[in-house]
Amino acid sequence: MEILNPNHPGWYWYVPFLDAYRRNDFHRALSNALKISMPGFPLGHVALAAAYGQLGEVEAGLTAVRDLLALRPGYAAVARQELDRISSRDLVEHLLNGPRKAGLEIPDKQGTATPS
């Protein structure tokens, strides 16, 4: 019999985060994002900023944005491109709205920064 590892990497929680976020279940998305708990994993900070932003938790969202930018200073400029690699275009646009609400100025599709 095979036993599953109870100490799996935190990034495993990114897919459940995306599913909850896609369904607009932002409380569950936040719960899953918090379980990622990997300070060096940029998508963990994106997940936190997205969930906090959608929930209107501005201060926590700003902290997630600051942590993301400390790790990846130019992330806002490449966010759409990087997220396009792992998610559908509709989900990417939905996902980008959360960090924007948290204070990350992400360029729109035409390349101009969208105000938070």
Image (cartoon, rainbow, N blue to C red):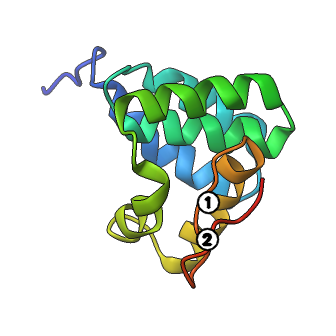
Q: Looking at the picture, how far across and down is residue 105, in whole percent? A: 64, 54
Q: What is the three-letter code of the residue carrying label 2?
A: Glu
Q: Looking at the picture, how far across and down is residue 66, in whole percent? A: 55, 28
Q: Looking at the picture, how far across and down is residue 21, in whole percent? A: 66, 52
User: Which is more toward the observer, 54 or 75?
Assistant: 75
Residue at the spot of label 2: 93
Q: Residue at x 44, y 26 (%)?
A: 36
SS at badge 1: helix
Which dot marks residue 96? Answer: 1
Mark 1 neighbour class, 10 Å CA radius: few under 14, some 14 to 19, many 20 or more: many
Where 17 sits versus 2, above or below? below
Where 50 sits versus 113, above or below? above
Q: What is the three-letter code of the residue carrying label 1?
A: Leu
Left or right: 97 as drawn, with respect to 106: right
Left or right: 9 as drawn, with respect to 16: left
Which dot marks residue 19? Answer: none
Left or right: 49 as drawn, with respect to 43: right
Q: Residue at x 28, y 25 (%)?
A: 9
How far is mark 2 from mark 1, CA to CA? 5 Å
Mark 2 neighbour class, 10 Å CA radius: few under 14, some 14 to 19, many 20 or more: some
Tell me, yes or no, whether the two marked residues, 2 and 1, touch with CB atoms within 8 Å. yes
Where 69 sits versus 95, above or below? above
Residue lying at the far top of the rendered structure: 7
Q: Quadrant of the N terminus?
A: top left
Where 10 sits versus 82, above or below? above
Residue lying at the far right of the rendered structure: 56
Q: Looking at the picture, how far across and down is residue 18, in whole percent? A: 54, 52
Residue lying at the far bottom of the rendered structure: 110
Residue 39 falls in image quadrant = top left
SS at badge 2: helix
Residue lying at the far front of the rendered structure: 112
Q: Residue at x 42, y 49 (%)?
A: 75
